[in-house]
Amino acid sequence: KNEVEQSPQNLTAQEGEFITINCSYSVGISALHWLQQHPGGGIVSLFMLSSGKKKHGRLIATINIQEKHSSLHITASHPRDSAVYICAVILKANTGNQFYFGTGTSLTVIP
Amino acid sequence: GAGVSQTPSNKVTEKGKYVELRCDPISGHTALYWYRQSLGQGPEFLIYFQGTGAADDSGLPNDRFFAVRPEGSVSTLKIQRTERGDSAVYLCASSLGQGAYEQYFGPGTRLTVT
């Protein structure tokens, strides 16, 4: 069982489309991160959330603590948004913080 | 300013050899994390440091893996008696503190064990 589940695993969209990537987790968390990884590239942190909603440019991230669910939205998608998007959570545990990652959503935006 | 740096960027080694991977965090970041990412998978947590001490090393797969951060800045991940299954990209990240702080990732070290 994976503590963090992402959907979809793969996503292809036309340029300009609105995109949603979902992340569900199974236990209480202290924070959730959305990360972006380009092919052959490093990982960039897009958002860190513990409640509510954050917006940066065309990217919006929301989290619902009660439902243990987060979404990453991309408005007016562009080919340069093509990347793997990874959800990562920091879980509260008796032994301290524990870190778990989803397997990622591979996004391809076609011109 | 300078981000997180990792050296080497690539390392090829023979099965059974010892390797060291280095991470230079962002100056002033007290928390440092090591992750491992296999092809087609998400990153997997290995260990994190708060200052000089390993706050949580529960992700280290076995006792061949060890990490240090003697002065609370640079960290070295050490792998003894490497196995082909250790081949992966080893990622380092740092943050201002532990827990709910944004993490900044290095470019990774691609380790290949032949």
Image: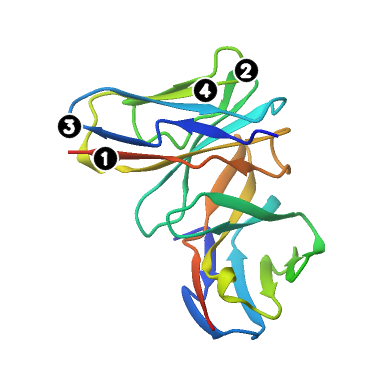
* Disc 2 residue type (three-letter): Gly
C-alpha gap between disc 1 and disc 3: 9 Å
Q: Are marks 4 and 1 in contact (CB under 8 Å)?
A: no
The residue drawn where x is 63% and y is 80% is A19
Image-based side of A2 in relation to B1, left or right: left
Q: Mark 2 — residue? A: B72
Q: Which mark is residue B112?
A: 1
Q: Which residue is mark 4?
A: B75
Q: Nearer the viewer, mark 1 or mark 3?
A: 1
Check whether the beta carbons of the residues at disc 3 and disc 4 lie within 8 A of each other.
Answer: no
Report x, y in % for residue A107.
51, 73
N-terminal-most mark, 2 or 3 = 3
Question: As drawn, is B44 to the left or to the right of A50?
Answer: left
Image vertical order of residue A79 relative to residue B82, above or below: below
Mark 1 and mark 3 residues within 8 Å of each other at the beta carbon = no
How far separated are the C-alphas under marks 3 and 4? Answer: 23 Å
Q: Quadrant of the C terminus of chain B?
A: top left
Residue at the image position 42 percent from the left and 54 percent from the top: A40
Kindly report the distance in space between the C-alpha atoms of the residues bearing marks 4 and 2: 8 Å
Q: In this picture, is B2 found above or below A11?
A: above
Whole-number angstrom distance, CA of label 2 to CA of label 3? 31 Å
Q: Chain of mark 2?
A: B
Gap in angstroms between the C-alphas marked 4 and 1: 20 Å
Q: Residues within 10 Å of mark 2 (few under 14, many from 20)?
A: some
Q: Position of residue A85 (x, y in %)?
A: 55, 64
Q: Earlier in the sequence, mark 3 or mark 4?
A: 3
Asked if badge 4 and badge 2 are on a common chain, one would say: yes
Question: Tag 4's secondary structure?
Answer: strand
Q: Are marks 4 and 2 in contact (CB under 8 Å)?
A: no
Total marks in image: 4
Foreground pick, B21 / A41: A41
Disc 1 residue type (three-letter)? Thr
